[in-house]
Amino acid sequence: MSREPAELLVEARDGSRAALARLLTYVESGGEHHRVTAALAYAAPAPYVVGLTGSPGAGKSTLTDRLITSALTRGQVGDAETFDQVAILCVDPSSPFTGGAILGDRIRMQDHATDNRVFIRSMATRGHLGGLSLAVPDALRVLGAASFPFAFVETVGVGQMEVEIASAADTTVVVTNPGWGDSMQANKAGLLEVADIFVINKADRPGVKETRRDLEQMLDLGRAREWRPVIVETTATSDEGTDALFDAIDAHRRFLDKDLLASARRQRTRAELDKVVSAVVRSRVAQLAHESAYEAQIDALVEGLTDPYRAAEVLLDES
Amino acid sequence: MSREPAELLVEARDGSRAALARLLTYVESGGEHHRVTAALAYAAPAPYVVGLTGSPGAGKSTLTDRLITSALTRGQVGDAETFDQVAILCVDPSSPFTGGAILGDRIRMQDHATDNRVFIRSMATRGHLGGLSLAVPDALRVLGAASFPFAFVETVGVGQMEVEIASAADTTVVVTNPGWGDSMQANKAGLLEVADIFVINKADRPGVKETRRDLEQMLDLGRAREWRPVIVETTATSDEGTDALFDAIDAHRRFLDKDLLASARRQRTRAELDKVVSAVVRSRVAQLAHESAYEAQIDALVEGLTDPYRAAEVLLDES
């Protein structure tokens, strides 16, 4: 029995995690419920989003765990809002089954497994027409509509999609380790482009100084930006440096005053609309190919009565 | 000064190679001339097309050279038509400059460099909205409209695009060498799927028996088809086996009686239309993103007055 998104959203706002989970499933699944959910979600304010990405094993989960504590303890980000709950979306594009990993995440983020102020969700796509790179922004808007003013998105890996998802955030944190060069070589430039904050996690290991120097050097050589990415050293396992990381996130949010935040979000909105338009078109074309008008155009082509370009335009203008 | 496609086509039919070359340039370049050229070309009968593909260095050019001789000497393919001229399109998707390689091809195919019955052209794309995989079928139709009843398409390499282009032919020839397993391992299954004829070229080298056994075994294991791919051994450099290869092409063309040929071509027409529809859509979306209606939808999104899915539909329905 599927329930109406509007009804579920009221319950989610009242604190029902089950209702919120159902809405996110609607987003993942595509279809009519997704459309209604999106319409409701985009009418609400967007949450402030912090994206975290980095190689598998860099320590992102432990770090996120610590950041949740910081966020809940300190009770505010920037000077605009206070908040009493936080959401975490975990995305692993390489795994088709992340949607089933919720229990695993709860065990993983042990400190907050039973904390009702914390909502942890693994994202998967089971039919969303734009895949994860569109499902995640939709899910974030749902969290905003469900009264979460603040959310983390954690992606595993530093491939193009992982970076794209994590960087569609207000503040993007790239998690490295001493000697990071080896594991992230392939996409160093891409990470440099999107990072607002670099974390050198596992800073109790040797090579921190060299890694910091390496990063500073890359930043010196990179495109000049108004915000120079901050480098923070952490040892998440012993909770060292995580407050400093939270300060850095806070500082970046302060830096993004109302104008900068609005212009960055407008740019992301444009990128998202581009992707949605392409996805809608792809699905329309797929639908088109099953219609009798399509067969008629193929007949006409075979008989030499048209050419494929004219046929395509006739089909698209009639669809 | 750009001349009208209709006028050029009349000249090309009268034997002007310059006019034909200009028409093919229109196809490569995209734009309005391309559209008119396509409209004219698709009204004419398609030529019978033989596709050749294989790893670089397998000996395709020498083999094609020999096949041209066979074709012109024997004067017919199948029992349907005789012909007195033949065209060869050379495609190297990995090279952005193949368009400039015409002189190279003429030198390469030495036997026919000065033979006016032979038309050799390297294909490149310089703006065609669908890239080479759409430019090549268009070019083949232009050749048909210019009274070539028969054409070869030779692609270098066995990657996805090379195989896609070469297999959009009536008869597809995959050129291997003794010990071919090493060089084509990655795409064996794909080649097996598209090949009507396997050639073991350089058959004067050791390992022919093993390669034939390997191929037969793959064919035994593969999907059963009405036409079991033929294996022909050739040594193109000394012209051994090339007549047998031409016989095999001829046999395959006879096998494809009117019904089979028509149904295979209809299937390819559908695949081509799918690609053209997608390409036209992509170009429309790109255009759309520059219009003021697009900005208005982004405004509405930022203000929370719509969602990206509704915005996309409004834009697409108005475009």
Image (cartoon, coloured by chain):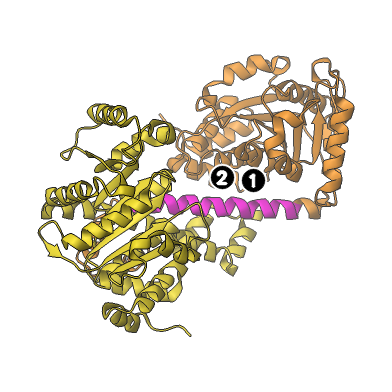
Chain colours: A orange, B yellow
Please state if B125 lies on the left or on the right of B260 as rendered: right
Judge whether residue B44 is colored magenta: no
Judge whether residue A279 is colored magenta: yes
* CA gap, disc 2 and disc 1: 7 Å
Q: Residues within 10 Å of mark 1 (few under 14, many from 20)?
A: some
Residue at the image point whose x is 42% and y is 59% from the top: B108
Q: Which residue is mark 2?
A: A40
User: What secondary structure is the magenta-colored segment mainly?
Assistant: helix
Kind of residue sitting beneath label 2: Leu
Residue A44, label in figure: 1
Residue B103 or residue A1, whichever sits in front? B103
Q: Chain of mark 1?
A: A
Helix, strand, or loop for circle 1? Answer: loop
Q: Count how many numbered circles sit on residues in the image.
A: 2
Q: Residues within 10 Å of mark 2 (few under 14, many from 20)?
A: some
Q: Residue A2 location, x and y as percent?
A: 43, 32
Residue at the image point whose x is 84% and y is 18% from the top: A205
Q: Residue A171 location, x and y as percent?
A: 76, 41
Please state if A308 lies on the left or on the right of A27 as rendered: left
Q: Are marks 2 and 1 in contact (CB under 8 Å)?
A: yes
Please state if B1 lies on the left or on the right of B200 as rendered: right
Please state if B89 lies on the left or on the right of A178 as rendered: left
Kind of residue sitting beneath label 1: Ala
> In the rendered structure, which segment of residues is drawn in magenta?
A262-289
